[in-house]
């Protein structure tokens, strides 16, 4: 495990994850001692989830939230950071849904017009 071996922190952003997937990841991290429930301040991971049953705006913000957390650990705490975002397709899908709700015209291939800046 990178976080344990190198003393850094892992940030995982689950965009549109299913509850089971998030729970499985959490349990695996507990078993590998990356998450220590007895001493939570020593845990080497931050998990952010926006589940599939949540509104598209919530799912879309997971990537930005995970990135902000990773930047905080890097810039303020001076830690090495491994940032993992799963699933980029679901991030784009959530953005497309938000764009449609706002009445924006999609691009020629169906994505939201703001994808390049997101």
Image: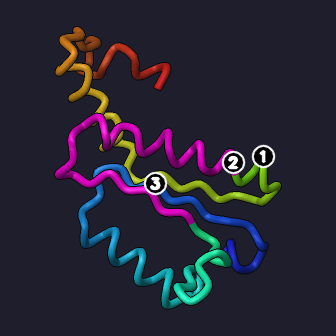
Say left or right for 105 vs 58: left
Q: CA distance from mark 1 to mark 2?
A: 5 Å
Earlier sequence position, callout 2 versus callout 3: 3
Q: Which residue is mark 2?
A: 72
Q: Residue at x 52, y 49 (%)?
A: 66
Q: Nearer the viewer, mark 2 or mark 3?
A: 2
Q: Residue at x 78, y 59 (%)?
A: 79
Label 3 element class? strand
Q: How many marks?
A: 3
How packed mark 2 is, by other alpha carbons closer than 10 Å (few <14, some 14-19, many 20 or more), is some
| 66 in magenta | yes
Q: Looking at the image, is 30 positioned above or below residue 48?
A: below
Label 1 element class? helix
Q: Which residue is mark 3?
A: 13
Image quarter in which the N terminus is found = bottom right
Q: CA distance from mark 1 to mark 3?
A: 19 Å
Which residues lie in the magenta part?
46-72
Earlier sequence position, callout 1 versus callout 3: 3
Q: Residue at x 52, y 85 (%)?
A: 37
To which quarter of the image does residue 89 belong?
Answer: top left
Of 18 and 58, nearer the camera is: 58
How packed mark 1 is, by other alpha carbons closer than 10 Å (few <14, some 14-19, many 20 or more), is few
How packed mark 3 is, by other alpha carbons closer than 10 Å (few <14, some 14-19, many 20 or more), is many
| Label 2 close to label 3 by CB (< 8 Å) | no
Say left or right for 39 vs 97: right
| Label 1 close to label 2 by CB (< 8 Å) | yes
Q: Looking at the image, is 21 positioned above or below residue 58?
A: below
Q: Which mark is residue 75?
A: 1
């Amino acid at each position: 495990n990178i976080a344990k071996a190198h003393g850094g922190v892992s940030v995982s952003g689950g965009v549109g994850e299913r509850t089971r997937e998030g729970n499985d990841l959490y349990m695996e991290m507990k078993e590998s001692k990356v998450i220590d429930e007895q001493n939570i301040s020593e845990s080497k991971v931050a998990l952010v989830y926006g589940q599939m049953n949540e509104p598209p705006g919530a799912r879309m913000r997971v990537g930005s939230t995970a990135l902000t957390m990773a930047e905080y650990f890097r810039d303020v705490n001076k830690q090495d950071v491994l940032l993992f975002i799963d699933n980029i397709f679901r991030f784009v899908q959530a953005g497309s849904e938000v764009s449609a709700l706002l009445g924006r015209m999609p691009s020629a291939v169906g994505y939201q017009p703001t994808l390049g800046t997101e």
